[in-house]
Amino acid sequence: MKFNFLFLLGYAHPLLAGLALTVKLTIASSVAGVVLGFIASLLRTYGRTAVRALAGAYVEVFRGTPLLVQLFWFFFCLPLLLHVDISVEVASFVALSLYMGAITCETFRGSLSLIGREEMDACVALGLGRMTRIFYIVLPLTFVRAMPPLLSNVVSLFKESALVSALGMADLMFVGQNIANTSARPVEVLTSTALIYFVVAFPLTRCVGGIERRVLRRF
């Protein structure tokens, strides 16, 4: 069997469109997930018992179930429960954001545990309020220390976002599957699709290593 990768040049536009959608979904879900994860980490660390239990249940459910099952649940089950139509874009965004929030919550909790007692005592001595301490002391220190694992989580989410193709969302994986089916050349198409994911993810992975070394030197 002869392989011909050049025919994919004729499909460059749909592949790039699929990649753009994948990147947009990853960025939007990552931003929402990071915000949600930080809030959940604060609730699990400083909240009352009932609040900590609810935040912990959320994290354990979304970390302990497959992402594909979560995507299917939000797309097929949630509309039945709410009696509303939910588009594949909204279902994918919500599922990926909640999943990202659950895994980043634990990342932030680890960073919060590194904040020294003396730093918090200094805030109290200066008369800083609770919200002031969170926004000007806790949040910056937590984000700086959590940056390497957070970026790793973003890279992982970018790769795992290929699962949204199972819902029919026209991301990179979905476009690649369609081209493979119509062209009857799955080897060339799926190999090229994998390479596109790699070309995007590999530089980000290298950046994570560089940022991690800088953070370790600083702290």
Image: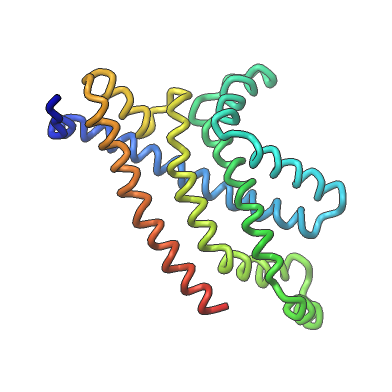
Percent of width and height locating residue 185? 22, 24
Percent of width and height locating residue 94? 58, 36
Percent of width and height locating residue 209? 43, 65
Quarter location, residue 183? top left
Q: Is residue 24 left or right of residue 19?
A: right
Q: Nearer the viewer, residue 100 or 210?
A: 210
Q: Nearer the viewer, residue 90 or 167?
A: 167
- Say which residue appears at 38% left-offset and 37% top-offset: 21
Residue 31 against residue 129 in the figure, above or below: above
Quarter location, residue 1? top left
- Say which residue appears at 80% left-offset and 59% top-offset: 46
Residue 153 against residue 177 in the figure, above or below: below
Percent of width and height locating residue 162? 43, 35
Residue 92 against residue 195 in the figure, above or below: above
- Say which residue appears at 57% left-offset and 25% top-offset: 72
Quarter location, residue 5? top left
